[in-house]
Structures are given as C-alpha cells and as structure tokens.
Image (cartoon, rainbow, N blue to C red):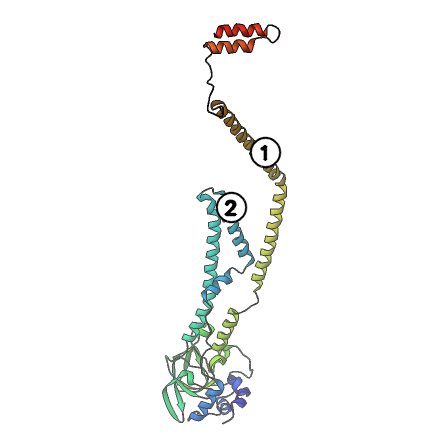
C-alpha cells in the first residue's frame, strides 16, 4: 500500500469526484472486495487521527456578558445611567427620580441578554453538527464485514456499506450500487429540499466544483434516503465538508476583527460621545454666570442668617443680665425700691436735684423727709 504522505499529496485523493472509482481505489491503496488490513488501518488512524470533529471549549458565561459591554454606545449609556443614579440619590426627589436611570439599565440588560443569546447560537450550532455524526458503520476489513465498527475509527481507504436510513459516517466516493438508484438527503449540508440521486460516473474533470455538482460523493452528516451502495472513504474528521463548516463557524465565533456594521456603529458612538461632550461644555459656559450669582446670593443669605443668630444670642445674654444682676461679693443684694415707697421717692428727687449751691439744702431737705 502507498504511504500516508503519498496519499495526502495525491490529486486522486484530493479530488475523488473527478476520477473513476477504480482510480480512487488504487490511489487510496485499497480494494472494494477486501478493504484495508487491520495493520494498515491502525497506521492510518495514527496518521490521520480519529474521525471526529474538533472539540471547542465553551466560553464562560461571564466572558460573554462582559463582551456585550465592550462597545462605545453601551459605555456612554452606562455612564449616563451612573450619573442619573447619582443625581437622583443626591437630590432625593423621590421614586420618580430613579425612573430614568432604571430604564437605561433595563435597556442595557436586555441588550446583553440578546447578545449572549446570539453568541451562544454558534456553540449550539457546533453541538448540532456533532449530533449529525454517525456512531457506527458497516466496514470491510481484512475481507470481513464489520457491522458495528465505531465511526470514529474510520480512516481514508475504508470500504463501507450504506443502505436506506443510514447516516453517512464520512465523506466517501460511490464505488458500487446494489440497487437501481441511490438517493441521499443533503438538506443538512446544502439546504436542498429534495433528495439527490447519486451515481458512480465521473462528474467533471474540474477539481474545484460546488458540493451540489458532486453527484458521485456522499458526505458526512447526510443520510441515505433510498437504495444501498458501497463507498470508499476519502476524508475523515475535520477534512470532511462538515468539518470545514465546523471550522468556519469556530473561526467566525473567535474572529477578532469587527464586521463593517460593527465598525460603523463604533464610529457613530465616538462621534456621539464627542457631540455630547461639546453640548455639556456649552451648557456649563452659558449657565456659569447664573451659577456664580446663585452661589454669591446663597453666601450672602447664609451670612445674614448667621448675623441674625449672633444678634439674637447677644440680646438673650443682655436680657439675662438684667433679670439676674450680680450683687456684692458677700451676697448683700440691694433690692429695687418701689416707685411708691419713700425711699423710691427720695431717690427720684435726688436724681432730679440740680447741681450747684443749693444742692446741699436739697440734700438736707431729703434727709428730713427720710428721717
């Protein structure tokens, strides 16, 4: 049998639809009556790997959520929500003040949910592709038909037998038909709504043709709708058409470059942010004089209020001193005299007496009255 390296570089193996069944069998170093030997199958399994699609690690949910906020417009809305919450908390105008920031946050949360759901669709699509794979295949090894050989052990060059209802385990070239017609259902791969008839003739001499034109090929993940046939495996694992789709989906999910629409949205977000900043600066400049006057007015009002409080305290202190005068050190208090008593009348006359030569006579007159 030819080596695996020679097979991988052979044009017959790369374009089996453009070669006859005999050329494909010869290029793969196998026989339609005997198949591969166990030793050769083991060697090719070591060289080509198992007939399985690559397993991708699932992206953590928190990474998907954070990725939804890595956008200019979303960051602007998030900043607006934070500022609105801060103003509502400081001003304390009641529940109505928190309505606007709550609506903004609700929109951001809905946007994140939709984004995570869309990101998860790619992973679900990969899982759906894996479910399309067959679990076992009727394989010819060492001249014996193995009815339940695991599909993951298939290698290029294996001869498999398919009948109605079977899933195709790998990409294979039709070698022999056991019925008049063989039809395959390829809706999962090409989207064709009707069954496709398969035939063993050479399709075209061109090496690169569309999948729908490869009428002598059966593809992994599709199913046999009617008839039965024998095929030789030409590609396994990620080298099948289904594997190429799997790889394209994985690359699209991990693509770093943004799409043209995403770039346009980012540019619009940057422009909108700059416009909002300019508007905020203009509003602040227009209202600066009013803001300064209000601050000065508030300062004067606070000064007057403090002055009134100070005067009120001073009056209370003076009023308290009048009501509770301090007496002599030994506690001898001079009680105020009544205006109708003799002492009170003498005191009033003494205050009204003129100062001069008659002041002594006036004093003696007061003393007589006191006596």
Where does the image place residue 53, in percent across and percent down from the top left?
Answer: 46, 78
Front in this rendered view, residue 43 or 352: 352
Where does the image place residue 108, in percent across and percent down from the top left?
Answer: 48, 55
Mark 1 → mark 2, Cα distance in angstroms: 26 Å
x 46%, y 56%: residue: 109
Q: Which mark is residue 300?
A: 1
Q: Nearer the viewer, mark 1 or mark 2?
A: 1
Does residue 244 appear to the left or right of 279 in the view shown? left
Does residue 180 appear to the left or right of 68 in the view shown? left
Q: In the rendered picture of this protein, how many numbered marks are placed on residues?
A: 2
x 51%, y 48%: residue: 86
Question: Which residue in the structure is indicated by mark 2?
Answer: 87
Front in this rendered view, residue 10 or 335: 335
Label 2: how many Cα within 10 Å (few below 14, some 14–19, many 20+)? some
Asked if the residue at tag 2 contacts the one at tag 1, i.e. Cβ–Cβ closer than 8 Å, the answer is: no
Label 1: how many Cα within 10 Å (few below 14, some 14–19, many 20+)? few
């Amino acid at each position: 049998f030819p080596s695996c390296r020679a097979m991988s570089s052979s044009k017959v193996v790369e374009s089996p639809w453009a070669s006859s069944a005999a050329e494909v069998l010869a290029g793969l170093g196998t026989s339609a009556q005997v198949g591969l030997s166990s030793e050769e199958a083991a060697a090719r399994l070591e060289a080509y790997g198992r007939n399985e699609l690559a397993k991708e690690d699932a992206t953590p949910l928190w990474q998907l959520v954070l990725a939804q906020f890595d956008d200019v417009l979303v960051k602007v809305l998030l900043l607006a929500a934070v500022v609105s919450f801060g103003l509502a908390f400081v001003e304390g105008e009641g529940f109505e003040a928190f309505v606007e920031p709550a609506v903004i946050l609700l929109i951001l949360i809905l946007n994140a949910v939709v984004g995570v759901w869309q990101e998860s669709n790619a992973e679900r699509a990969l899982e759906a592709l894996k479910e399309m794979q067959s679990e076992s295949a009727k394989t010819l090894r060492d001249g014996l038909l193995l009815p339940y050989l695991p599909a993951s052990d298939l290698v290029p060059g294996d001869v498999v037998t398919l009948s109605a209802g079977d899933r195709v385990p790998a990409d294979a070239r039709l070698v022999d038909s056991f019925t008049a017609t063989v039809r395959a259902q390829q809706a999962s791969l090409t989207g064709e709504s009707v069954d496709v008839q398969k035939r063993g003739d050479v399709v075209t001499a061109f090496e690169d043709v569309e999948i729908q034109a490869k009428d002598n090929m059966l593809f992994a993940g599709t199913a046999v709708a009617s008839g039965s046939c024998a095929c030789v495996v030409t590609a396994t694992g990620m080298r099948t058409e289904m594997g190429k789709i799997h790889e394209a989906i994985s690359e699209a999910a991990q693509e770093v470059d943004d799409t043209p629409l995403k770039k346009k949205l980012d540019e619009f977000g940057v422009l909108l942010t700059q416009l909002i900043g300019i508007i905020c600066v203009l509003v602040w400049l227009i209202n600066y004089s009013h803001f300064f006057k209000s601050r000065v007015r508030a300062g004067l009002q606070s000064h007057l209020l403090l002055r009134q409080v100070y005067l009120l305290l001073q009056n209370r202190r003076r009023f308290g001193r009048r009501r509770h005068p301090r007496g002599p050190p030994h506690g001898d208090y001079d009680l105020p005299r009544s205006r109708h008593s003799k002492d009170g009348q003498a005191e009033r006359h003494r205050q009204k007496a003129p100062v001069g030569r008659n002041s002594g006579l006036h004093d003696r007159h007061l003393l007589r009255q006191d006596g």
